[in-house]
Image (tube, rainbow, N blue to C red):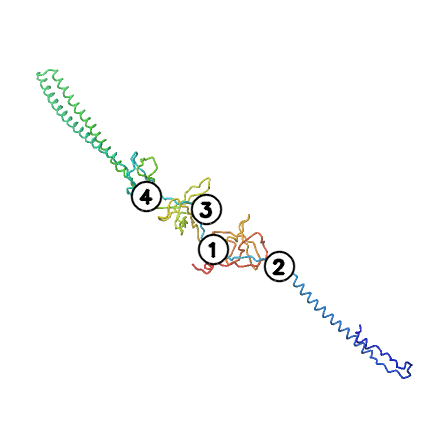
Amino acid sequence: MIPPREAALSQPERPTSTPTGGSSAAPRPRRRRWPIAALLLAAAAGAAAYVFEDDIRAKVGGLETGRAQAATEPAAPKPPAITVATATRREIAETLVTTGTLVARDEILVGSQIDGLRLEAYLVDVGDHVEQGQVLARLDRDMVETQLVQNDSNIARAEAAIAQVEAAIAEAEASVVEADASLQRAVTLKRTGNATEETLTARQTAARVAAARVAAQKQNLKVAQSERTLAFAQRREIELRLARTEVKAPAAGIVASRTAQVGQIVGMSGEPLFRLVRDGEIELAAEATETRLHSVSVGQPARVEVAGFPEPVAGRVRLIEPTVDATSRLGLIKIALPADKGLRPGLFARGMIETARRVGVVTPQSALLFNADGVRVQVVKDGVVADRPVRTGLSDATGVEVVEGLQEGEEVVARAGGFLRDGDRITAVRAPETRADAGRSRGED
């Protein structure tokens, strides 16, 4: 295409008419002609300029279009960010948590040992510490003292009866001597013929009667002596009843409860007047499942959190009952606690028994997955997840010991779940290390 300017220049000039209007015989002026080569060169230059301009516009438009497409096309997705935790080697202690009630290790029931007496006064109250033999309460003793006076008279009467029988025995024995002498004289006179047979028989009868009187009086003496013995036995009983009008502590301890009231008629079959905790010893009677009883042994340390106490109380396992309740499937464990005035029977408490302690490779509890094949963890290496079966050991509040299947320093998914599969790629995010874990990793106490 020829530009308009060049086309105008290329047109030949037309002759102009003279004012006279006739034909001019004068020669026409010579028209100016452009060389053909110059015209062709100008046309080619114009076309090249237009082509170059169109090419630049096309390139600029293509660049802008590429940038727009690059801005609108989505980037390739990154692997999901997953928190991972590092398996560390540290000391781990497994504890068994149990709950129960504080009870007295040895509770002593103190009541009246005689019936039908009125309570005159009680001398101790709940919470008091008492010693062995200390008087806790006094009963009315007027009736018992009256019985003691009566017994004194019975003893005196028995002793008088004994004296009378002893005198009768002496008299009977004297009669026996006299009868024997008369009999001997009668026998001598009978031999010489100076006494008759009747006299001899009478003297023999008198001797036998005297001997029988002595024997009877001796039996009476035994009866009198037995009555005196009975009176003395009754006296000892009355003295014992008199002593029992003072209710005493059979052992040292702390008064846990009191039902004694002034004026009540006490009895041996009624409710005890006092309950004592021997030596103030309190223990926790806690229950544990039958599957965990095998891990508990006598002497293991324990920490007991008592309701109302700001700090746990240290104790030790004292007794493991050999039987398990057939209904609840629970066994009873008794944890001995130190004597403390604040520990009272009946308080709710929770015991934590340390069943084992050792050093091992520990991972968070949330990193474990449980299925029909056992326990496994999801190990992360170079951003790739790999399922791995493991064997666990001890556990505490924050971690679980891995006995087999995991090495120290390996990373695992901190919160394992079913949404990850073996071979999945993830972006590992390290879990923040706690102060306690940092101390353990550096070997601090």
Where's residue 151, x and y in %? 22, 32
CB within 8 Å, label 4 to label 1: no
Q: Is residue 339 visible?
A: no
Which residue is under mark 4?
125
Quadrant showing the C terminus: bottom left
Q: Mark 1 or 3, which is nearer the eye?
A: 3
Q: Mark 2 or 4, which is nearer the eye?
A: 4
CB within 8 Å, label 1 to label 3: no
**Disc 2 to disc 4, C-alpha distance:** 79 Å
Label 4, residues with CA under 10 Å away: few <14, some 14-19, many ≥20: some
Which residue is under mark 2?
77
Is disc 3 placed on a helix, strand or loop? loop
Where's residue 47, x and y in %? 77, 73
Asked if residue 238 lies left or right of residue 44, the reply is left
Label 1, residues with CA under 10 Å away: few <14, some 14-19, many ≥20: some
**Disc 1 to disc 2, C-alpha distance:** 39 Å
**Residue shown at 44%/40% (left/top)?**
325
Label 3, residues with CA under 10 Å away: few <14, some 14-19, many ≥20: few
Which one is earlier in the sequence, the residue at label 3 or at label 2?
2
Asked if residue 75 lies left or right of residue 202, the reply is right
Q: Mark 3 or 4, which is nearer the eye?
A: 4
The three-letter amino acid code for the residue at tag 1 is Gly
Is disc 1 placed on a helix, strand or loop? strand
Asked if residue 128 lies left or right of residue 162, the reply is right
Which one is earlier in the sequence, the residue at label 1 or at label 2?
2
CB within 8 Å, label 1 to label 2: no
Q: Mark 3 or 2, which is nearer the eye?
A: 2
Which residue is under mark 3?
292
Which one is earlier in the sequence, the residue at label 2 or at label 4?
2
Is disc 4 placed on a helix, strand or loop? loop
Is disc 2 placed on a helix, strand or loop? loop
Q: Residue 189, relative to residue 35: is it above or below?
A: above
